[in-house]
Image (cartoon, helix red, strand yellow):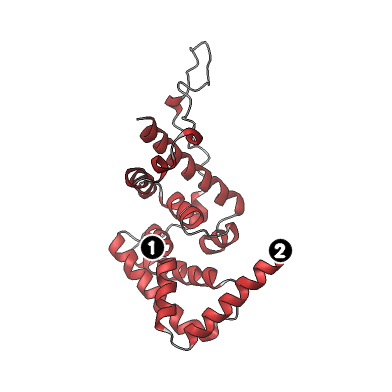
Amino acid sequence: MSQASIQERVAAEEGELLARLRAGDERAFEALVERHYSTMLAVAQHYVKTRAVAEEVVQEAWLGVLKGLDRFEGRSSLKTWILRILVNTAKTRGVRESRSVPFASLGPESDEPAVEPERFRGRDDPFPGHWRAYPADWQRLPEDALADRETLKVVLGTIELLPDAQRAVITMRDIQGCEPEEVCAALDVSDGNQRVLLHRARSKVRAALERHLDG
């Protein structure tokens, strides 16, 4: 199927979903909430102090979505529009709590190493800069080792501990499957910043998985 055909199908599906939402279809709305809730929560947590407040922000954003459905003109994807409402709601709440920090102000975290420096040999070593122990070859591991509950727990636990911007970006890209353009539009970051944040986050998750799988 060509890219154009895929885009046409996605547009048709979104148009059908929008019609159902405007008609008050509760099942359509429940499915939409289930699809986007975790992404919205991860983004909201950057702007407010606690998860409980972030959950309130998400609920408030969904009310904004419902009220604004008739005004949605389709200039962006429905998901991008929802995330923009979420970010605006979170910023407003964050200002009230004196904790709002724009994603753009965080920069690409250029001073932060993607992988822990201690995993490489030091300057006094005969082979400075080389790995002390090379990462495991995941291709040789059985699939169930990569999909078991403990491994998933390591991944999700590592993501939960990431800096706010990294957590939001990796959640949107790798868990929710957002396109780079959607992340940039929702979080108000440049494409370069988005890519660096994602690289930092993926590197930390990979390092945690290596430690877990190497045992």
* Residue at point 47%, 83% (across, down): 21
**Viewer-side label of 2, 1:** 2
Residue at disc 2, secondary structure:
loop
Q: Residues within 10 Å of mark 1 (few under 14, many from 20)?
A: many
Left or right: 43 as drawn, with respect to 215: right
* Residue at point 44%, 26% (across, down): 119
> What number of labels is visible?
2
Image vertical order of residue 43 relative to residue 196, above or below:
below
If the image is split into quadrants, where does the N terminus sit? bottom right
**What residue is pinned by disc 1?**
41
Image vertical order of residue 27 relative to residue 178, above or below:
below
Q: Quadrant of residue 53?
A: bottom left
Residue 75 in view, yes or no = no
Image x and y of residue 84, in percent: 50, 69
**What residue is pinned by disc 2?**
2
Residue 186 in view, yes or no = yes
Image x and y of residue 179, in percent: 57, 59
Disc 1 marks a residue whose amino acid type is Leu
* Residue at point 49%, 86% (across, down): 22
Disc 2 versus disc 1: distance between alpha carbons? 34 Å
Query: Which of 14 and 48 lies nearest the eye of the viewer?
Result: 14
Query: Which of 59 and 97 lies nearest the eye of the viewer?
Result: 59
Q: Residues within 10 Å of mark 2 (few under 14, many from 20)?
A: few
Query: Which of 207 and 142 lies nearest the eye of the viewer?
Result: 142
If the image is split into quadrants, where does the C terminus sit? top left
* Residue at point 52%, 86% (across, down): 70
Disc 2 marks a residue whose amino acid type is Ser
